[in-house]
Image: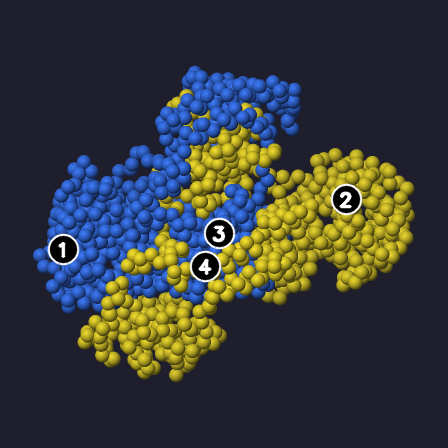
Chain colours: A yellow, B blue
Amino acid sequence: MAGKEATVYIVDCGSTMGEKSHGRSQTNLDWALEYVWDKITTTVATGRKMAFAGVVGLRTDGTENLLDNEDDYAHITVFQELGQVLMPQLRKLRQDLVVSGTDGGDAISALVIAIQMIVATCKKLQFQRRIVLVTDGRSAMQADDLGDITSKLKEDSIELVVLGVDFDDAEYGFKEEGKDATKAENEAILRQLCDDCSGVYGTLVQAVDELGVPRVKPTKPVPSYRGMLTLGNPEEYDTALAIDVERYPRTMKANPASASKFVIRSDMAAGEATQSTHTIDGEEAAPNGTNDGLAAVKTARTYQVDDENAPGGKRDVDRDELSKGYEYGRTAVHISESDQNVTLYETSPSFDILGFVNKNQYERYLDMSRSNVIVAQRTNDKASMALSSLIHALYELESYAVARLVMKQNKEPRIVLLAPNIEPDLECLYDLELPFAEDMRSYRFPPLDRVVTVSGKVLTVHRNLPNDDLQDAMSEYVDSMDLSTFGQDDAGQPAEYGAMDETYSIMLHRINQVVKHRAVYPDTDPPPPYEVLTRYSQQPSELANTAHPSLSRLIQAADVKKVPPKARGRRYGRKDAPKPLSELDVGALLAQDSKRSSKQACIDPKNAIPEFKQLLQHAEELPQLRAACAQLKAIIFDWIRHSVGDSGYGRAVEAIRVMREEMAEVSVAAAPYNEFMRELKGTMLDGGLGGERREMWYRVRVNRLGLLLAGECDGGVSEEEGRAFLSAAPVAAAAAAQ
Amino acid sequence: MSESSNYGHGEEDDDDEEEVADEAGYKTSKDAVLFAIDVSESMLTKPEDSNPKKRDTMLSPTVAALKCAYALMQQRIISNPNDMMGILLFGTEKSKFQAGDAETGRGGLQYPHCYLLTDLDVPAAADVKQLRSLVEDDDEAADLLVASKEEVSMANVLFCANQIFTTKAPNFSSRRLFLVTDNDYPHASSRDARNSAAVRAKDLYDLGVTIELFPISHPDRGYTFDRSKFYNDIVYSATPSDPDAPMPLTVDIKPASSTAKDGISLLQSLLSSVASRSAPRRALVNNLPFEIGPGLKISVKCFILFKRQEPKRTSYIYLPPDSDKPQIAVGSSTLVADDTARSVEKVEVRRAYKFGGETISFTVEELAKIKHFGDPVLRIIGFKPMSMLPIWANLKPLTFCYPSEEEFIGSTRVFSALHQKLLKDKKMALAWYIPRKNATPALAAIIPGAESRSEEGEQQVPPGLWIKPLPFADDIRQAPDINLVTAPDPLTDAMRVIVQQLQLPKAIYDPRKYPNPSLQWFYRILQALALEEDLPEAAEDKTLPRWKQIHKRAGGYVVGWGEVLDEQFREWQRGHEKHIKPTANGAAKRTKAEPASSGGGAGAKKVKAEDGGEGVTDADMRDAYAKDALSKSLVADLKAWLVGKGLKGVGKKAELVDAVTKYFETKMDVD
């Protein structure tokens, strides 16, 4: 794909470009540069060595070009010879392209210079040649040699693009009133020139507007399978059908540029390490991008195995001491070097149709993968005809084929769906991978159109089921928000709104946008995202307005109520304790149990969590809650104190979690938990729970079991305090507990 | 740290930018299943009218349950390698509890007639072996599977389970007790004993353990399991860990019959019953706001119902020099600066993009702002007919979503109304979709999915909405240019008959019938290695086409189609002979008549390219091979040709020549 290209930008820097026209807040030059920078940085971003760019300044104060001894070529400066542009060149150009104090300089002469640059660099080689001229057309031009220029452009197939500041463009619908005569004349000349050499002539406002529409990078199709599509087994039966086909990607996720990890180099002061001005001298940057004060970050891996004799029960082992294998449950299975292939299921490339299914019964949730397109071998007319008959037969029968595909030798077989597609010049099969038995998870969910009770009764009227009014309102709303004709096609006819080819990869273009922006304007904040990227984040307002009455009706019929944060989950002292299916009153049974019924019941450490919860069922007052927590606290402390290594940590974490959850549900009870937590931290980190327990504290942190926050429970602490608590030193925490 | 071993294994994923679901940090998102299997006289009795030809039907209920547990254990090692499993027999003559529990000295005396066969843990090869020998070796079974003469206390069984969960699987998000029994009325004469059991069941509930009951009836003895006698006091409708869990649908808990009259053995129905509950439901996203329109929000939970199951990645194994027991080495990563090799804290790390030979960097805050497109939401933008969704518009498996009442009361009825409307009118919604905090926004189609049930009434696919992230323009590739030759009607007609002959059963694709052959092979080998069994010789591959059937049902029509193709193509050639143009690289495109077909039979309809516009043809290559002149071919040609055959086209020229030679050596008979 990556062919060679050479583009020369001619940028008008004349004094008139310093004006701010038509109420714009930026100068004409800055406005024009928006376009130019975007184009150049797009080329830089590709990182292609053979994507050359050159920049010529027109109407510059100085003069520097191949023909600079001739008067006709005065005030023209070659700022950048044709070549790959990198950051240093970009920085230089930013200094170069400024408004000059002159009006001298002929655009046509600049064109000649640009043509010379291209001829000198590209010679007769395969290049895509282009000249982009951006000007306000307000200086005199010598239009005598235009014929020669036209024929030269044509001869070398150089594409000419002329973009004018406030040029008239009937097609785009722009006309500048009160234009001065020189400009009008120049516009006419340039338009004629473009027409003659089949170039592009446009007004700048259109070009800048279109910068907001991302360009999609075309990718050369590379086949993922070439071979036969068979029905039956040609090796065994003489009744098998085989068609030579090729398979190409149809969808493929385009990923945004990925950021690499860096740290500021240790030999740099922090301040120095921003956009430094180290140059690269055409050399590849030092391998890890260290040129701008950053050092790359790598991931180092260490390995540990259990060892009873080592402190902590674990011991580091060197990578070289390890060999490859697999885990089978918690058993390690070693596979020696020579047996590496023993787990490989041997296959050879093949593409076999298993049978056919009904299109209308196919459920779209079976789609497993990106899609591909299958066409006949591209130079094989007979195969094309043969495949066409399959495509048409499937289409007419409203059927899809199901096939088994092995793309390459020893690749795992996949089952794919083959769907026919018929367009005037493209007949093909689309394929999508289908799931295997192992890929499905059978989670059960109750039906949505009826409610089945425990006793097996089927209800059709229930608070979880929509009534007729809600169904009607929903139906009306869905119909009123129809997008199938809300959009517009190129001809202004009603068309689908939000069609896939009008939507652009949000993160990809967002990252490109800000990276390009920062490359040119290192000191400015990143711009807001292009409108087109966020266009589909909201309903189109025009349609939403029309549909508003239906929506209002729906909202009324739906009667949805937000659950207040406090009411979520269970509350203490609530009436409806959970009951088994029989509705047996287990609470009453518990009450008969002498060990558990009394309010001062003692929690059995072996059954701590259930008994703690059951105790809370009867606890109404703060002292009772405190007493329950104190009991659980003693048990938790015991577990940690007697833990061999981390053996007791799991239970302790669970108990802490339960205490936290239960207390969070009681509206006044942040205190008992937070007191407990502070004491735990203080005691534990001071070594009061059987020695060094940092690992346990780590678990408290990763499980987010810190203090109850104000947002979770009345009487909770602020977020800052909660965060400080989790990270603060033990001494401070102990002090806070006082 | 030890916690990281659960997640960070071998993960060198750069993408830590998406915040992981909030709940994940709270509990270990793992599942622990403890089988409790009743060993009573009646559970050990083989069915009377069993069919000796079918070994499955000869099993006593206890052995069937053990086999089922054995199957589940093998399966879970594959599908949920981090999940725990254990097996507790109750009502046995023998008693046994956790081995080596020195701390308390608990022994079998504490839980009489409870025999902990496999302690709750991630299964090891030894556990699988032990269980296998029990279900396959009758002597061993006869020794252990002896029913106790006195009745086992159910309260004790439940407390025993409680202790196993408490000590072995603390802080698990899902803990389940699978109870297999045929006794619907234990302690028939003692209300007190039944009440203590109910109390112990409540303990389990408060501990967060769900009891799943697998009741067995004996139609041959005129006995039907009645849940209302005892077990409805034990089983709770909602689990504390998942308040939204459905009522246990009564159809799902069909008492399995111990007879095989309806063709389904006890083992089979137990297996299917267990399979349907083997996976604990884990939400991908909890309580995602679903905005139906401005001002109308409900909440949904998202689940992954389809996910490509891949073979395990290799791990590093440590072979201690002084023992032959390999150990798994647990890896952990640290970040290191490249220049000085000092280790780096996460907060120091900056992100930068390579650009123009340098790096463009942003502060963490800037980058967060750049990537922020709003809070998590599924927001409907409008509706379209399903017909506007082309079949190819897909990138990855879909996400299932189902309403939740946790954030908004009334979510379920609104969701249901939308679901029914979309189903009825075959419509979909277009939505702006940010599944998690800081996740990349996507445009998604929301597709209604109807509930599907098997003939036995088991739910196979739940009803709900499916979120399908759509490709952007950037993700859509252009189709290659082709020379289209449209099939004339007679040829299409001939093909239509073939298609009609070869419908899959019920004209649908049922994934359950197609196990992944590579994955199955991988785990069979791994299991054989782990259990020190003999390696299997051949794999069973259910994805291979039924060639014989295809031959029988459609063979004749294919031959007919081939004849029509020859005829129609000759006609087409006559009309197009003048239009043969040289292709871009100068090679003329010729299309010859049918090549010689294999085996001399006139039937095999291979449509092969005789001459490609690019690369070397098979014929050229075969010529070169026959003349021993392969080494004169260009490396590029050899490579291209090998790749075209799906072989490896890499290496030095000699290797390439070898590969081609090898290919022809095995294929010579075709010539």
* Mark 2, secondary structure of its residue: strand
Q: Which one is closest to the eye, mark 3 or mark 1?
A: 3
Query: What residue is pinned by disc 1?
Result: B92
Three-letter amino acid code of the residue under disc 4: Asp
Q: CA distance from mark 3 to mark 4?
A: 16 Å
Residue A661, x across and y down, in percent = 37, 71
Query: Does label 2 lie on the same chain as label 1?
Result: no
Q: Nearer the viewer, mark 3 or mark 2?
A: 3
Q: Which residue is mark 4?
A: A468
Which type of secondary structure does the marked residue at label 3 adopt? helix
The verdict on a common chain for dots 3 and 1 is yes
Position of B93 with respect to A478 (left or right) is left
| Viewer can see residue B166 | no
Residue picked out by circle 2: A200
**Residue, x 81% and y 51% (percent of image)?**
A168
In the image, A223 versus A184, the foreground residue is: A184
The part of the image, by quadrant, that contains residue A411 is: top left
The mark closer to the camera, 4 or 1, is 4
The extreme front residue here reads A468
Q: Is residue B276 visible?
A: yes
Q: Residues within 10 Å of mark 2 (few under 14, many from 20)?
A: some
Tell me how far mark 4 sits from mark 1, CA to CA: 57 Å
Instruction: Give the chain of mark 1.
Output: B
- The residue wearing badge 3 is B422
Between residue A430 and residue A213, name the one nearer to us.
A430
Q: Amino acid at mark 1?
A: Thr
Circles 1 and 2: CB distance less than 8 Å?
Answer: no
> Which residue appears at 89% of the width and 44% of the height?
A143
Would you identify the image quadrant in which residue A598 lies?
A: bottom left
Q: Secondary structure at mark 1?
A: loop
